[in-house]
Structure formats: C-alpha cells, structure tokens
C-alpha cells in the first residue's frame, strides 16, 4: 500500500513535488489540484488526475497527505487550515514572523479533525531550523549564524521587476566570504546585515529607460537593498535567458561554542547546502516529511507539527533495523 | 525541579559530562560512580557524592538519568543492560557492527522496567548518523560519504603504543583534501580506504629502539594501518607533551544527490564538525539527549532508543513556543 499524495497548486514547487514522488517507491501521486482551468494544465505524470481546486473535498479518504504548494503571503494562511480539516497536510509556510499565528490557526483545526498538519517544511524554515536547534542544544554557550546563498531570491527579483523601466530582473544573494571565515574562526563576531550578504542584480531595462535612475532606485530601496552592498548589472534579454534561467540556492548554518571547565575548548558545527534547484530541493524535503506526517497520523497523533516534532526515523523509507545497522 | 543526573565511570568522557551539566541550567549532577576507591577520586564539582559503582542501586529513585561513560569493548555491553533495569540511561556505544545486538539486549530490559535506554549517542554514532539519515531521506538518489578528522584516534594511538620500543604515541586521522573536493564536486567518486584518509603518527621511542623497525611495524599493521598511507614521525617526550596533549577531532558527512524529471539537478548537503575536545563535545551531545530521554520517559515511553527516535524539540531546554519563534 503506497502513501497517496495530492498536490495542491502546480507551480515550481508543485512540479518539484511531482518529480520527488517518483524517487520515493512507497508513494504515489493521486491528483493535482489547481485554481486554473484543469483542462489547460499539462502535468508530467501520465494517468494522474488534474482537478479543480474546489473539487478537493471529493478526495477525502482517497488522499493520505495533501501537499500545499501555494505562497506564504496569501495562499497558505487560508489554505492550510481549510485543507487540514480534510487531509493530513504539509506546507512550506516561510514568513518567519507569522509562524506562531499560523501554527495556532492550523493546530486548532487539525486537532479537531484528528489530522496531522505539518507546517514550515523545507530548508529554511526546515533543515536550517533543525540544525539551529540541534547545534544550540549541544552547545548552549555559543552563537548561531545563518548565511544564505549563493542563490536567487524570488522576492528581491520581484521587487526589482516592479521598478519602472525594468523588463526582467534576477537577484542573487551572496554570502560574504570574509564574514564566513570570521565565523568559522570561532571569534563570535558581531555582524551587521551589510557584513553578511551582498546582493547582486541582473537587470533587463526597457530601451529608453534611465539606467542610472533604475540603479539608484534599486540600491536605495528600503528593506530590500538599502542595508546591503548591492551590485547592479544591466544585461540583454538573451543573456538573461542564457545565464540566469536556473533557480540555484543554498547557505550555511554555523554554530560556534565553548566547552570545558574554563570554557577553554572551541567547537564549530557547520551545515551547508549547495542546491542547483531551490524548489526541487524544497520539494524533496517536503516529501520526506509527508511520509512522517502520514506515519504520525497512523500512530494516532494529530495537530499542527513542525520539523522539530518529527522523530527522524519516520522520514526514511528504510525499515528501522536497516537504519540502525547501516546509518547509525 | 532539575533533571537529576548520575555519571557512571569517570574518565575523559565522565569529566566532559560533569562539565557539560554546568552549562545546562535544568540539570544537576547527583553522584559520580567509580570502580576505583571513591576516596581516591577528586572530581571538579563540590558537594557531589563520589560513590562505589556497586552502591548504585541505592540511588534508584534519586537519579533521573544515569550517563554511562565506560568503554564499548567490555564495559557497556554489560553495564547498559544492567543499569537500564534501574534508571533511564544514555550510553555512547560505538562498535558499529555490534549495535543491533546491543540494542536488542538493552531493549528487553528497558521495556520490562519501563525505562528509556538511549544507546550510541555522541557524534559518530550520533550527530553524523542523524545527518546520514536526514540527507538520505531527502535525496534518495544519491551517495553518502563520511570523513573523519583531523583528529586523534585513541584506538590507533593505543595500537602503536603496544609495539615494542614505543614509549608513547599519538595517531591523527586526516581526511584527504582531494577526496573531499571530488565528493563536493558532485561526481560521486568511488573512493578506497586509502583515498579517503591519511594516518599520521607521532612516536616517542625508547632510547635504543630500532626506529626503522617500529616504522615498518606500524605501516604494515593489518586493519589499523596497512590499508592507508601512513606517515610516522619520531619525536621526544617533551615534544609529545607540548604539541600533542589535546584530543581534537571532527569530520564531514556529505551527501550528493540528484533531483528533477531527468535527474538534471545536483545538490550537496554537508555537515561538518571541528572539535577542540572530542570527549567534551561527545559529552555535550549526550547531555542534550539525556534531557530527551528523561522527557520521553515522563511521556510514558520506554525501551531502547537511538538518536533516530528523538523528536528534536525534546533536546532543547527552551520551551516549544520559543523554538518556533526563534529557531524555526
């Protein structure tokens, strides 16, 4: 009996989930749900139903875990609670500041309906969060650092695209090597936003656009760019297509800490990711946690859960005895 | 109410546990148990009892978690089951091949007595195992690599010390940079034992010893050195004391894997440790898992557990709401 998965929303993340399911022999994709006209949607898996989002309730009992692939700004705050009333669900809600509120909303419904609703799954929040937790629990006297990149920030790319005269834009977040080295040296540096990351923008401008003005508007944009050293390159549409069509990302979680009667010993714990495809890797994490959500629900658990609640063994397709023998 | 900890065995690891407990405000050390004459043992914490190992049963009900600090070869196979009949216990059993057998022995007794017995806790087995599991669950199409070092191998140092004419010895395991680079490139290289690690020995020889013979005996020693490129340096007792008194260690767990409909995207997950003191870091990991063992037992769980069974939130002294808010 395979774990029956539904995909709710079919953008980059949804396609990543579809692809990841193929790599997991204990899972099968049952249906993809979309708010677009289902007839217009071509998916990559033959013989899988594409259904209108508002028919989802017909699949109660036919889907073990629904994976929500909408955005955190407007989709997930309503979709996750709504769908958790019908299915075990996993989402990748990533508005860090609003996680407690989202948790509370989802928890009430999931508990009432005896479902598992796992929120904020991916790599940050997700695997990076786990590594912050593990490292902090092991080295209580220490300091955490998270660096992102090199990778494409969708939010920052969108912000540049909204500037008048910009036809297309791609923004890379780049960790500063000197800052990484300082952290790894164990000196526990105090780092400002500007010290940690550079922002590099590739911009396709309209023909008669004022490039100097665009560059100024980017560099002075509050929240997005003003606190960073920002580099702006103007390129052609062809160059954009040729050199910047990927969605790579990654980053580093580093904790340095001290042990010993006189705090005389230094330790460095580092976790890093280097990803060719941000959405596909996020999807791969989500699919493993969907397995755990299914198993936790089978074990009688319910309510809102995060990566912090999941016994790691539940993530693996391998039997426990094999894990003990081969990986421990 | 603090978690009451006992330490069973007071060598490097036991002292590390004692020191780690001071960094965790929710724990207190109740007693240290030793097979030596307790009167001869000076510990670093005032007002804590030092007791003979055979009085341990007098502490039933007075200690929440007993941390076993004996060796894997002869101590833990008997001590862990024995003490799991009286206390929640944590050990660092690290004979990988015998873990399934140790698990079965411990599980039976711990279940019978409704205790949690957490085995093989530390960094390998332990944190490295966890990272192998997480990475493998996320990237099913991929390959794992574990490198150790640079660090002191106690077992290999001991093996060199047993050679006639050797007064003292220290062996460092060193990962080969070219092998690490090849793994990180994502090409999934097949690496032999010799490709992955170098063994470097620092030896103090007796005055009239045949150094050439000692070097030959080291380099040809089966299991320990014959399969490696080994470097031997002869040094003085003073140099040994001055330059090689620390017990550093560390290593790398790397998984590279592919995603995408045509496996066209590469991903690299890397976890690394750089430790000034192997026993103190191991102790720090164990103390965090002792907290989890205590909480799992309070929740009504029992039996043998490993790091794979522990919901990460149970490791942290911080309340769940704070974890969600600050670390997720």
Image: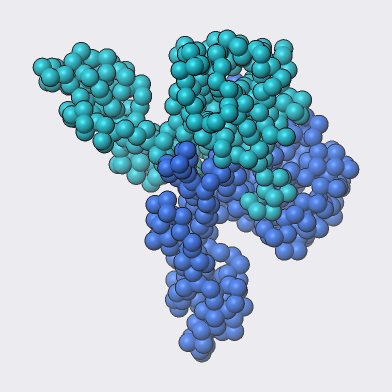
Chain colours: A blue, B cyan
Q: Residue at x 53, y 42 (%)?
A: A139
> Viewer-proximal residue, A107 or B297?
B297
Describe residue A222's horizontal placement relative to residue B13 as left or right. Answer: right
> Viewer-proximal residue, A192 or A257?
A257
Q: Residue at x 72, y 64 (%)?
A: A73
> Viewer-proximal residue, A129 or A43?
A129
Q: Residue at x 68, y 25 (%)?
A: B64
Residue at the right extreme?
A112
The percent position of residue B187, horizontal first and vertical second, equals 39, 42
Is residue B9 visible in this depiction of the protein?
yes
State which quarter of the image contains the N terminus of chain B: top right
Q: Residue at x 75, y 63 (%)?
A: A74
Image: B211 above or below A231: above
Residue B158, picture quadrant? top left
Image: A120 above or below A315: below
The percent position of residue B317, horizontal first and vertical second, equals 65, 41
The total of numbered circles placed on residues is 0
Residue B80, picture quadrant? top right
Image: B92 above or below A137: above
The percent position of residue A282, horizontal first and vertical second, equals 60, 50
The percent position of residue B126, horizontal first and vertical second, equals 52, 30
Describe residue B300's horizontal placement relative to residue B99 as left or right. Answer: right
């Amino acid at each position: 009996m395979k774990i029956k998965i539904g995909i709710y929303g079919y953008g980059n993340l949804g396609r990543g989930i579809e692809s990841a399911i193929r790599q997991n022999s204990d899972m099968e994709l049952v249906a993809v749900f979309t708010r677009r006209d289902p007839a217009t949607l071509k998916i990559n898996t033959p013989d899988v139903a594409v259904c209108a989002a508002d028919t989802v309730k017909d699949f109660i009992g036919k889907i073990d875990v629904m994976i929500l692939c909408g955005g955190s700004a407007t989709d997930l705050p309503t979709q996750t609670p709504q769908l958790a009333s019908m299915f075990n669900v996993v989402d990748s809600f990533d508005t860090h500041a609003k996680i407690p509120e989202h948790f509370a909303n989802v928890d009430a419904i999931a508990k009432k309906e005896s479902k598992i609703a796992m929120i904020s799954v991916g790599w940050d929040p997700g695997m990076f969060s786990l590594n912050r937790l593990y490292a902090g629990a092991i080295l209580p006297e220490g300091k955490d650092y998270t660096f992102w990149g090199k990778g494409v920030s969708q939010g920052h790319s969108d912000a540049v695209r909204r500037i008048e005269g910009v036809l297309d834009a791609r923004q890379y977040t780049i960790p500063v090597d000197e800052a990484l080295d300082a952290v790894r040296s164990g000196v526990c540096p105090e780092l400002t936003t500007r010290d940690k990351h550079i922002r590099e923008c590739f911009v396709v401008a309209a023909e008669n656009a004022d490039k100097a003005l665009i560059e100024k508007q980017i560099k002075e944009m509050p929240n997005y760019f003003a606190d960073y050293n920002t580099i702006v390159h103007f390129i052609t549409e062809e160059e954009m297509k040729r050199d910047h069509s990927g969605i790579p990302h990654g980053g580093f979680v580093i904790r340095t800490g001290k042990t010993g009667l006189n705090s005389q010993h230094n330790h460095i714990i580092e976790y890093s990711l280097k990803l060719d495809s941000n959405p596909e890797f996020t999807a791969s994490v989500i699919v493993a946690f969907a397995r755990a959500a299914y198993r936790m629900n089978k074990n009688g658990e319910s309510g809102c859960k995060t990566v912090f609640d999941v016994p790691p063994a539940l993530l693996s397709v391998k039997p426990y005895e094999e894990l003990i023998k081969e990986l421990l």
